[in-house]
Image (spheres, rainbow, N blue to C red):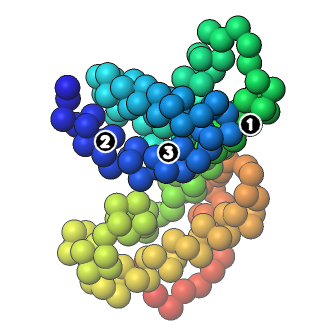
Amino acid sequence: MDTEVVDWLTINFLPHEAELRRMLRRVCTGPAEIDDVVQETCYRILSMASLDHVRDPKPFVFRAAKNIVLDRIKRDAVVQIETIAHLEDLDIADTAPSPERVVFARSELKWVIGLVANLPDRCKSVFRARRIHGLSQQETAETLGLSDGVVEHEMMKGMRLMSEMIAMHGVNQETGDTKFIARKRAGKKSNVQD
């Protein structure tokens, strides 16, 4: 038996066992059947080679128990109506994002990367270091060989330019227009040199 799976079971199954038993009371015929379902759930989890694919343990455990109850229902010749009626109680919402949300998030990320790509070079480097790589202002200054003031100025400039691009192109459109920045910057006088 793999110790990682035993540890996983201890950490992720045992805290939910009481709630699982409470829900199983609605679909099982008695305490002995509840014990059997809980034991079989533990056995199925323990017999798995790896649990790396499990993102949210509670829905996984409840789904495993529900599958065992469904298998028992299929084997039994006579099934109580209450068992079927309460079977949905074992459904726990999966917190993983839906496929639509994943596609939307990827599209949104691609759009933001397009905005960042349109920033001037030094501004782009500062923005990436601060917002993408998570460096502090001081770390960014040291890494890029700039002063703290320049890093702060470039971040403010980057945020301003990105806001202008969003205002110009809208939130739902991808940007590929680098002429926009050059045109806006050429018409604006600044007291700080870029």
- Rendered view: 160 above or below 168: below
The circle on residue 8 is: 2
Mark 3 highlights which residue? 58
Mark 1 highlights which residue? 86
Q: Residue placed farthest to the bottom in the image? A: 191
How dense is the environment of label 2, judged by Cα within 10 Å: few (below 14), some, or many (20 and up)? some
Q: Please tell me how many numbered marks the rendered image carries.
A: 3
User: In front of the other: label 2 or label 1?
Assistant: 1
Disc 1 element = loop
How dense is the environment of label 3, judged by Cα within 10 Å: few (below 14), some, or many (20 and up)? some
- Rendered view: 188 above or below 60: below
Query: As rendered, which of 135 and 69 lies closer to the eye?
Result: 69
- Expressed as whole percent of the image width and height from the top left, the position of residue 166 reads 69, 63
- First reached walking from the N terminus: tag 1 or tag 3: 3
Disc 3 element = helix
The circle on residue 1 is: none
Identify the amino acid type marked 1: His
- Expressed as whole percent of the image width and height from the top left, the position of residue 136 reads 31, 76
Question: Left or right of 43: which side holds 145?
Answer: left
- First reached walking from the N terminus: tag 2 or tag 3: 2
Disc 2 element = helix
**Residue at 73%, 29% in the rendered image:** 83
- First reached walking from the N terminus: tag 2 or tag 1: 2
- Expressed as whole percent of the image width and height from the top left, the position of residue 15 reads 41, 53
Tell me how far mark 2 sits from mark 3, CA to CA.
12 Å
Asked if residue 107 can be seen in this view, the reply is no
Residue 126 sits in quarter: bottom left
**Residue at 59%, 34% in the rendered image:** 30
How dense is the environment of label 1, judged by Cα within 10 Å: few (below 14), some, or many (20 and up)? some
Identify the amino acid type marked 3: Lys
Query: As rendered, which of 123 and 72 lies closer to the eye?
Result: 72
